[in-house]
Image (tube, grey):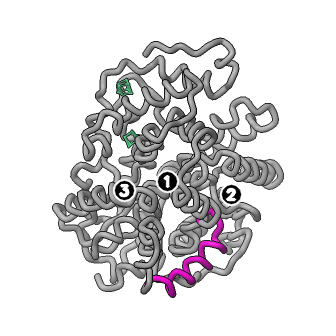
Amino acid sequence: METHFSKEQLKNKDNKSSEKIFRKCVHCGFCNATCPTYNLLGDELDGPRGRIYLIKDMLENNKPASEKIVKHIDRCLSCYSCMTTCPSGVNYMHVIDHGRSHIEKTFRRPLIDRLARNFLSKVMPNPLYFRVIGILTLFVKPISFIFPKRFREMINLMPLKFPKKNLPKMRVYSSGKKKKPVARVALLAGCVQEVISPQINEATIRLLNRHDIEVVLPKGIQCCGSLNHHLGKNDLANQTFKKNILIWYDEYLKNGLDAIISNTSGCGTTLKDYGFIFRSDENLKKKAKKISELTQDISEYLDENIKLNFIKKKENDKEYKIAYHSACSMQHGQKIHDIPINLIKKTGNQVFDIPDGHLCCGSAGTYNLLQNDIAKKLLKNKISNIEKIKPQFITTGNIGCITQIANGTKIPILHTVEIIDWYTGGPKPEVLRNL
Ligand code: SF4
Ligand code: SF4
């Protein structure tokens, strides 16, 4: 694609990076074929190629974002399915991030929109605020009809239960055995996941400890920053990124870290991008790059580093039929697809890919809260594809997808790490108690 940035414009690091990406695009449109919003809406501007044109035009001509551009960019899920399909290696993720940040700086959204986005940006990344709002929401649910549609949808999507934590809150979890641990890793405990599904971190810690790996949760780390990053709120996101980088790097230097584990693929994708985000920051680039290099999804880490001890227990003698939902951030963002499936196969159960598995379930961070109508259609399609398999339960590696899919079906859904924990000596996951 031809570009027309001036020399002055290319002094800006983001323009420079985006220009290189635009030049790779050969307008072939292959990406449209696998774009969920293009498939649903049929509009060129709701596909990756159209969005690339919109962003390029806005940046090249130094234009503020218009209502039309915002509409089409907001509808993008950041699912990165287009990146998997693109034969030219266009990094759409960096282009859409740049576009979103430009929108945030140059476009004044309608009041309700601003209120909703500011609310999400403050509440979601903070587990304490999220818990308090969640409890308040329980009282408001019966009268949710009095709220504007945007807020009504958010209220209805809030979980009804906040499970109790079973593991005591500690900074370091060790195996309890006297011998030296075989490795030491940091776990990103996350923000929303920590509140609505604490059992995922607990299964991860138990599993790693059982295999003689020490797990550390450095003080001060909560959100990975991706929620604000995807809302285009780069100042807020960068504050979180910088804090995380400094804390983890300090831990790495002082006590040693063999890996930083993410069990939420959406967060893992962002952590692996810290190096790019701070590529021009002289103080942080080396540290950010190291943090990205240390980051691994839990499935990757288990596959590469641990000889898992699968054990037969009375309650898991049965053979289950499991549907594997490949989260977009896992398959398209991190290019991890077969690893979790092969790990589950080692438990002796049958695992099936979901038809049209490359298409998003509609969760996409805060997307299901902000673009509820499209998210609902995508969820409906996902559930109908899952039902074709007739599984006894569903598994995936991303809390957003777990919450979204659970809203559309009664088939139990759980994180892949909970299955591996169970089959290597952990308790049977609560969500499967009736199976
Ligand atoms: S990220 Fe997903 S929704 Fe956005 S353009 Fe690419 S395929 Fe379409
Ligand atoms: S598939 Fe890649 S090269 Fe082709 S239009 Fe889409 S982004 Fe451009």
In the image, residue 161 lies at what x, y percent? 48, 83
- Crowdedness of circle 1 by 10 Å Cα count: few (<14), some, many (20+)? many
- Kindly state the secondary structure of the residue where label 1 is placed: helix
Q: Is residue 148 left or right of residue 405?
A: right
Magenta region, residue range: 124-141
| Main SS class of the magenta portion in the image | helix
Residue 213 in sight from this viewpoint: no
Q: Is residue 111 left or right of residue 10?
A: left
In the image, residue 335 lies at what x, y percent? 43, 41
Quarter of the image for residue 185 reads bottom right
Please report whichever mark, 1 or 3, sits nearer to the chain's N-terminal start.
Answer: 1
Q: Are marks 2 and 1 in contact (CB under 8 Å)?
A: no
In the image, residue 44 lies at what x, y percent? 31, 33
**Real-space CA distance between mark 2 and mark 1, rounded to the nearest whole angstrom:** 21 Å
In the image, what residue occupies the spot 52% across and 71% down?
A: 203
**Residue that carries the numbered disc 1 in the rendered image:** 265
Q: Are marks 1 and 3 in contact (CB under 8 Å)?
A: no
**Real-space CA distance between mark 1 and mark 3, rounded to the nearest whole angstrom:** 15 Å
Q: How many marks?
A: 3
Please report whichever mark, 2 or 1, sits nearer to the chain's N-terminal start.
Answer: 2
Which of the numbered marks, if any, corresponds to residue 184? Answer: 2
Foreground disc of the pair 1, 3? 3
In the image, what residue occupies the spot 55% across and 22% down?
A: 61
In the image, what residue occupies the spot 53% across and 36% down?
A: 65
* Quadrant hosting ligand 1: top left
**Residue that carries the numbered disc 3 in the rendered image:** 362
Q: Is residue 41 above or below residue 306?
A: above
Say which amino acid is labelled 3.
Gly
- Crowdedness of circle 2 by 10 Å Cα count: few (<14), some, many (20+)? many
